[in-house]
């Protein structure tokens, strides 16, 4: 897409996403991203963000990736637009071109995401943002959604990375040498494996859960939050969204707070701001949180963590306990 600004400009004009007199002054990457081609188009008096999905991971073209993620993202924005609380913390979707799997967004500016939180937590500084985010999540989970919102191909991809690869012996992932004994014990732990499998089945929708199925963001972590200059935390990138157990989003959220240095007591207090759907099971959420911690240390998608290995080993042991305590296994 970046190579052909003239063709993009013509397409944007044909789609009426830009006016007849507008033209692209500059086209540059919108920010860090792996999966898709994401560009900022400077139009002189305004700018827009374009996001295109291709049938592979944009940064690693050898790795296939489901093409329909763009249409899922567009459908998510349409659902979000039915709620003020949800839509005001997201950029506006200005258009979707199904033929080119191309999304067009309001530009939130050169806002940083929140991944710097793994390096140094300034708990007071971000408390208000975290309250906004958990409030947003509760409003999302309260939406009344038509249709299945299955997103099966993306779910299957994520299922491998969250529930399978991290507990696979010799998974080929580079792991801190001090953590290798723990990794090896996890791969041989039958109870952990069985519970991970059950959580994975709930994630895929092949096992039941008591909570009401709701629309999930699907990737609710600091890389999906942008720190807007005036509005604070904004939410982007719902391409892994689907209708499923609300405990998954909450679990991922809390796992990342742990990896940002938050204590469990602070997380519990923060979660008092979450409006949980009927039947919400906090043990199930803790189980998903445990899997997210395990996969971010023993899996492929690792994070710029600053915590020492002793701390990471503590998180891992707590994660293991939470997974095994996450519900009945039969
Ligand atoms: N509406 C927007 N306004 C401003 N910047 C944006 C906007 N959308 C995306 N960006 C920038 O582009 C980056 C990549 O966007 P996004 O996360 O949606 O793409 P992605 O390909 O799904 O990334 P990843 O592979 O990390 O999931 C964001 O981190 C952000 O810096
Ligand atoms: Mg993404």
Image: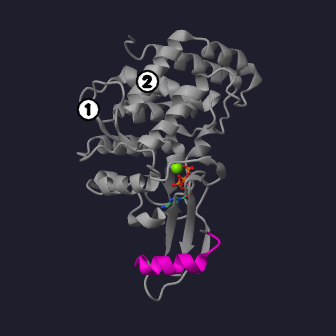
Q: What mark, if any, has residue 199 been given in the picture?
A: 2
Q: Residues within 10 Å of mark 1 (few under 14, many from 20)?
A: some
Q: Is residue 11 part of the magenta span, yes or no? A: yes
**Residue at (56, 61) in percent of width and height:** 38
Q: Position of residue 184 (x, y in %)?
A: 67, 16
**Residue at (37, 12) in percent of width and height:** 328
Cα separation between marks 2 and 1: 16 Å
**Residue at (49, 53) in percent of width and height:** 67
Q: Secondary structure at mark 2?
A: helix
- Say above or below: 145 vs 201: below
Q: Which residues are magenta?
A: 2-17
Q: Residues within 10 Å of mark 2 (few under 14, many from 20)?
A: many
Q: Position of residue 252 (x, y in %)?
A: 47, 34
In the picture of the structure, the residue carrying the numbered disc 1 is 212
Q: Position of residue 241 (x, y in %)?
A: 40, 44
Is residue 53 visible in the rendered image? The answer is yes
Q: Position of residue 257 (x, y in %)?
A: 51, 33
Q: Among all residues in the image, which is located at the extreme bottom?
A: 21
- Say above or below: 58 vs 134: below
In what quadrant of the picture does the N terminus appear? bottom right
Q: Secondary structure at mark 1?
A: loop
> Is 214 situated left or right of 114 in this image?
left
């Amino acid at each position: 897409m970046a190579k052909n600004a003239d063709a993009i400009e013509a397409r944007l004009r044909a789609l009426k996403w830009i006016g007849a007199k507008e033209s692209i002054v500059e086209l540059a990457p919108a920010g860090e991203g792996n999966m898709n081609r994401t560009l900022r188009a400077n139009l002189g008096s305004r700018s827009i963000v374009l996001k295109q999905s291709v049938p592979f991971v944009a940064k690693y073209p050898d790795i296939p990736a489901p093409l329909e993620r763009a249409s899922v993202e567009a459908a998510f924005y349409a659902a979000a637009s039915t709620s003020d609380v949800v839509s005001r913390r997201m950029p506006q979707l200005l258009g979707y071109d199904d033929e080119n799997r191309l999304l067009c967004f309001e530009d939130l500016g050169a806002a940083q995401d929140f991944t710097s939180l793994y390096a140094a937590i300034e708990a007071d500084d971000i408390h208000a943002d975290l309250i906004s985010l958990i409030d947003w999540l509760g409003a999302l989970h309260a939406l009344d959604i038509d249709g299945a919102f299955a997103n099966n191909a993306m779910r299957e991809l994520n299922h491998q990375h969250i529930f399978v690869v991290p507990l696979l012996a010799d998974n080929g992932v580079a792991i801190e040498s001090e953590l290798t004994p723990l990794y090896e014990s996890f791969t041989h732990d039958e109870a952990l494996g069985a519970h991970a499998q059950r959580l994975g089945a709930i994630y895929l929708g092949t096992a039941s859960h008591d909570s009401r199925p709701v629309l999930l963001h699907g990737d609710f972590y600091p890389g999906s939050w942008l720190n807007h200059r005036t509005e604070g935390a904004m939410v982007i990138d719902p391409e892994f969204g689907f209708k499923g157990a609300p405990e998954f989003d909450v679990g991922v959220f809390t796992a990342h707070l742990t990896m940002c240095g938050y204590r469990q007591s602070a997380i519990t207090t923060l979660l008092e701001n979450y409006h949980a759907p009927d039947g919400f099971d906090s043990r199930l959420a803790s189980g998903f949180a445990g899997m997210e911690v395990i996969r971010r240390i023993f899996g492929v998608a690792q994070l710029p963590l600053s915590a020492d290995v002793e701390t990471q080993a503590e998180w891992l042991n707590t994660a293991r306990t939470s997974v095994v305590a996450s519900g009945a296994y039969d």
